[in-house]
Image: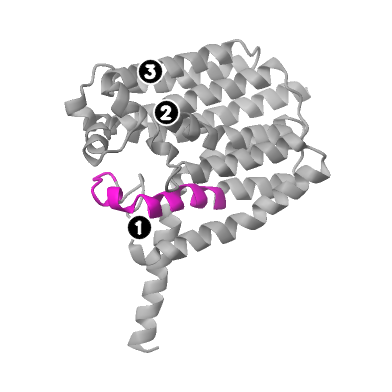
Amino acid sequence: MTATQLAHGTDRRAGVRQVVGSSRPLSWINTAYPFAAAYLLAGGHVDAAFVVGTLFFLVPYNLLMYGLNDVWDHESDLANPRKGGVEGVVLDTRWHRTTVVAAVVTSAPFVVALAAFAIAAGSAASLLVLAVSVFAVVAYSAPRLRFKERPGVDSVTSATHFVSPAVLGVTLAGGTWSWPVVASLLAFFAWACASHAFGAVQDVRADRSAGIGSIATVLGARRTVRLAVGGYALASVLLLTAGWPTALAAAIPVAYLVSILPFRSIEDEECEQANRGWRRFLWLNLVAGFALTQGLIVAALAGGG
């Protein structure tokens, strides 16, 4: 093998690492799990729709969401000290086109297939949810739309990214909209809004300097953290109203509330300190996901018995 071939091989591997890194592998499970769990709990089975939906929300969806964000936010990412690790790569401009193509090419077949499943099931609701989900992913970062820079809308759109896969799972499986289902999804939405708001706190000064709006730049660091605390508390209360055994999951939002409570009085000038809480949040997701999975298994076994 020549030196040129070795160089090309190394270059390709670097490109793959950049593209895959832009999809935030640590967060893949955060969108695939809600769809899979909701689909099965709503009465679905491990069938073609389950497999296609789970695979879509595992990788292509995240590449579409985060990869496009890294392309369109390149300039601000260069000035963001948090970028370059688990919180996102700084995507080299030479890989921008590759990332966009990869995001579209890998997502399109799954979207078409899921739409076909929805049509076959006669579920107009599934088609609508799928359209909203994909639109929210693109609109969050896309030029001109830039929902991420619209205070309030940013948190709602981010929450839609994570809750819409679960809603699609319910509709595609033909599930019933009982109060436990609705309460769980509302709790998930409140949790996701709170999580996005808290995540924006660490960037208050940087975003203001760059002229970027967010819920945190409008409310300020301290009020945003307190709003996030309220969001987690609301999520817990909603789960408590869902009945047994769903009410057991009320402890999960409380764990997030306790995690961010030390930052409740943080000032804008020290907003970067909230990054400690955000990094803890990323790992807490894994612990919470494990706990939720064990709870679902116990509930399923109890129901089967």
The dot on residue 55 is none
- Could you tell me which quadrant the C terminus lies in? top right
Determine if residue 48 is in view. Answer: no
* Left/right of residue 247 with respect to residue 224 in the rendered view: right
3 or 2: tag closer to the N-terminus? 2
Question: How far across and down, in percent of the image, does residue 168 sit?
Answer: 67, 36
Q: Which residue is mark 3?
A: 227
3 or 1: tag closer to the N-terminus? 1
Which quadrant would residue 194 be assigned to in this image? Answer: top left
Q: Which residue is mark 1?
A: 91
Instruction: Report the span colored magenta.
Output: 60-82
Which quadrant would residue 43 be assigned to in this image? Answer: top right
> Which residue is at 26% across, 52% downward?
78
Question: How far across and down, in percent of the image, does residue 42 sit?
Answer: 73, 30
Q: Which residue is mark 2?
A: 195
1 or 2: tag closer to the N-terminus? 1
**Farthest front residue in view:** 144
Determine if residue 239 is in view. Answer: yes
**Magenta span dominant secondary structure:** helix
